[in-house]
């Protein structure tokens, strides 16, 4: 005869908590860290010039292989597969390799970059990297080999294949395109490559993968001064997938418009034109679903200006008002660089609410380069929706006025209702330069992804596991008709004290030297390398910033942004949109700095 046990309410509550902790023990993060398999969803090989920069941020030498796809086509068994493979030379720790437009065949539209080890040799004395390069090259235009051959790399990084993974790599992709209104002008944008950790997690309850796009426009403004967005979607899985896209207008919490991609083969990218289903003068966000992991890049173009950023995976949260099982976001995001309102720039922070249930109450702090508050803005965001927070233009004074922003999601309550914990958020930074304070003529656009706190510093106390190193795949001081770079480095730790960092400079063959820098709490250091005579003209290389010492409680906490000027330098404006930006890569784990020993920075014991 069966026995029945009666449980009281406290016993049931305890049982529910135990089950919740057992099933969902901790939050899994989607840190945009460097990895050994990196998606490159957009390569403009026909109308634009694309440069892909691959930096080794590991502890040993490595080689990388870029596999390329052409136009999207049918699914298996008719799919074409990759059309080319390109291989790097030997990459010492910290150094970078550039795949220029001439290295990629015409018709290339997407790619995946793999890092392979060089130490283990097979019976013929060939390294994993060299053998993998030959194997991938032979698989070109052979979709069956790509899908089914045991030595292929469709699932590289997810399954155990015969080749050893190499060191983690950081990838930045820059593009120079003709102006949309005046093809004689050039406009520039960049995005960061997407590692396996940034692809999201499979939803075991509802099935599939989901992604967010915080900021999209359809004919926003009056032609020809209107802005339009295209979403590029790459299938990085092993099977064909369809994609559903839910478009949600800003400040409208219900009734999304749904678009669809019927079929997308592995490795291939489709460009989705929002204007086919969304009405003009529209601004909002999007939510995507697919059966395979995706890489998403978003382009916004208008009045000969160009900005780009990457989409991010949706979080998984099965307990209302509880911690998510998996999330790319956090209650606090950081924007390590804004150009100030006194310098002719307008800063917009677009914040996406990752909760599908609760509204988010978000406050954005705009601060100067010392961390002092310029202004704050608070607003509500719909579930799965997004909202804009602006620091408007005031004037166009000469000089360099920079700052940063901090985005906070905060808990709230309402009489007669339970408390709501702070929903997690993700953010995109959009900064635009105008000819005057009346915003009569826009000049430049820079977009980049803001940084969730787990990638930089846990506000406000830190957890001694913050980002102590940043990677910048390109540092250049070239002639006026080429690329010049600037970097922003922010000490995000708000606790009193200072942090010393060593800036390691590399050419394509390895380490050259270092320069020390000290930053106080919350301080932003903006460096224009065109002004550094220490770096010779004509130099192109890469940079690793590594914290060496701190007096601040909570430990290291760095964030950064890389800026490129194509054809000019800072404060020397030219026709067209010459500027582009990307978020610096947080580097966790061991990094080997070749040389005689650790840096001897002033003030370090």
Image (cartoon, rainbow, N blue to C red):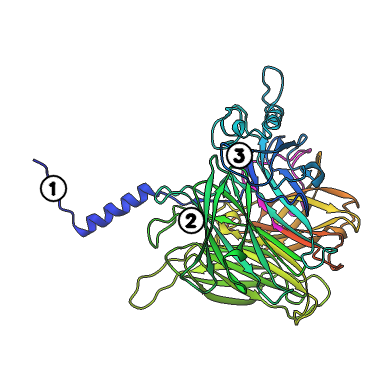
Residue 241 at x, y percent in the picture: 52, 46
Q: Are marks 1 and 2 in contact (CB under 8 Å)?
A: no
Q: Is residue 587 visible?
A: yes
Residue 40's mark? none
Q: Quadrant of residue 105 in the image?
A: top right
Is 53 on the left-hand or right-hand side of 351?
right
**Residue on which disc 3 sits:** 79
Residue 34 at x, y percent in the picture: 64, 46
**Residue on which disc 1 sits:** 4
Is residue 9 or residue 361 the one in the foreground? 361
Badge 1 or badge 2: first in the primary sequence: 1
Q: CA distance from mark 2 to mark 3?
A: 32 Å
Residue 125 at x, y percent in the picture: 72, 19
Task: Classify mark 1: residues with Cα within 10 Å, few (<14), some (14-19) or many (20+).
Answer: few
Tag count: 3
Circle 3 sits in a helix, a strand or a loop, which is it? Answer: loop
Badge 1 or badge 3: first in the primary sequence: 1
Which corner quadrant holds the N terminus? Answer: top left
Q: Does residue 129 sit above or below 101 in this rendering?
A: above
**Residue on which disc 2 sits:** 315
Task: Classify mark 2: residues with Cα within 10 Å, few (<14), some (14-19) or many (20+).
Answer: many
Q: Main secondary structure of the magenta part?
A: loop
- State the residue at coordinates (60%, 76%): 376
Q: CA distance from mark 1 to mark 3?
A: 58 Å
Circle 1 sits in a helix, a strand or a loop, which is it? Answer: loop
Instruction: Give the residue furthest to the left.
Output: 1
Q: Which residues are magenta?
A: 582-605
Q: Quadrant of residue 455 in the image?
A: bottom right
Camera-near label (1 vs 2) is 2
Badge 2 or badge 3: first in the primary sequence: 3
Q: Is residue 605 visible?
A: no
């Amino acid at each position: 005869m069966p026995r029945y046990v009666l449980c009281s309410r406290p016993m049931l509550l305890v049982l529910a908590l135990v089950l919740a902790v057992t099933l969902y023990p901790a939050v899994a993060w989607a840190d945009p860290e460097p990895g050994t398999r990196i998606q490159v969803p957009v390569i403009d090989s026909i109308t634009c010039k694309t440069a892909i920069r691959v930096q080794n941020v590991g502890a040993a030498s490595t080689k990388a292989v870029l596999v390329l796809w052409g136009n999207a086509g049918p699914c298996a068994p008719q799919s074409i597969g990759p059309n080319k493979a390109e291989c790097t030379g030997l990459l010492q720790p910290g150094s970078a390799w550039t795949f220029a437009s001439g290295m990629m065949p015409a018709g290339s539209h997407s790619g995946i970059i793999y890092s392979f080890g060089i130490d283990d040799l097979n019976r013929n004395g060939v390294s994993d990297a060299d053998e993998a390069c030959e194997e991938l090259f032979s698989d070109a235009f052979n979709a069956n080999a790509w899908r089914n051959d045991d030595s292929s790399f469709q699932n590289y990084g997810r399954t155990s294949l015969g080749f050893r993974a190499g060191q983690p790599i950081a990838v930045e992709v820059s593009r120079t395109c003709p102006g949309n209104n005046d093809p004689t002008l050039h406009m520039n944008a960049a995005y960061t490559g997407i590692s396996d950790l940034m692809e999201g997690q499979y939803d075991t309850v509802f099935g599939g993968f989901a992604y967010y796009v915080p900021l999209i426009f359809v004919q926003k403004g009056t032609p020809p001064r209107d802005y339009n967005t295209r979403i590029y979607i790459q299938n990085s899985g092993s099977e064909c997938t369809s994609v559903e896209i839910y478009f949600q207008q800003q400040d409208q919490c219900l009734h999304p418009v749904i678009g669809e991609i019927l079929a997308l083969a592995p490795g291939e990218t489709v460009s989705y034109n929002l204007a086919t289903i969304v009405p003009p003068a529209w601004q909002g966000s999007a939510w995507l679903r697919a059966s395979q992991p995706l890489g998403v890049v978003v382009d916004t173009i208008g009045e000969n200006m160009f900005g780009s950023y990457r989409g991010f995976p949706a979080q998984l949260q099965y307990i209302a008002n509880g911690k998510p099982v998996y999330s790319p976001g956090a209650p606090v995001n950081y924007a390590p660089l804004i150009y100030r309102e006194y310098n002719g720039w307008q800063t917009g922070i677009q914040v996406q609410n990752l909760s599908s249930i609760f509204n988010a109450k978000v406050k954005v702090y705009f601060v100067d380069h010392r961390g002092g508050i310029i202004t704050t803005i608070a607003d509500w965001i719909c579930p799965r929706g997004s909202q804009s927070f602006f620091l408007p233009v005031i004037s166009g004074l000469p000089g360099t006025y920079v700052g940063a922003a901090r985005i906070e999601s905060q808990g709230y309550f309402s009489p007669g209702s339970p408390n709501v914990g702070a929903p997690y958020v993700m953010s995109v930074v959009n900064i635009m330069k105008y000819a005057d304070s009346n915003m009569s003529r826009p000049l430049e656009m820079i977009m980049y992804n803001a940084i969730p706190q787990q990638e930089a510093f846990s506000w406000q106390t830190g957890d001694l596991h913050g980002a102590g190193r940043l990677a910048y795949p390109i540092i250049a001081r070239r002639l006026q008709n080429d690329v010049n770079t600037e970097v922003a480095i922010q000490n995000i730790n708000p606790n009193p004290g200072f942090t010393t960092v060593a800036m390691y400079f590399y050419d394509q063959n390895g380490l050259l030297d270092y320069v020390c820098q000290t930053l106080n709490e919350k301080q932003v250091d903006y460096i224009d390398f065109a002004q550094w005579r220490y770096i010779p003209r004509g130099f192109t290389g890469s940079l690793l910033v590594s914290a060496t010492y701190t007096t601040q409680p909570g430990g290291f906490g760095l964030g950064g942004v890389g800026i490129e000027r194509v054809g000019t330098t800072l404060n020397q404006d030219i026709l067209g949109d010459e500027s582009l930006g990307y978020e610096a890569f947080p580097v966790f784990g061991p990094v080997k700095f070749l040389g005689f020993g650790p840096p001897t920075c002033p003030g370090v014991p």
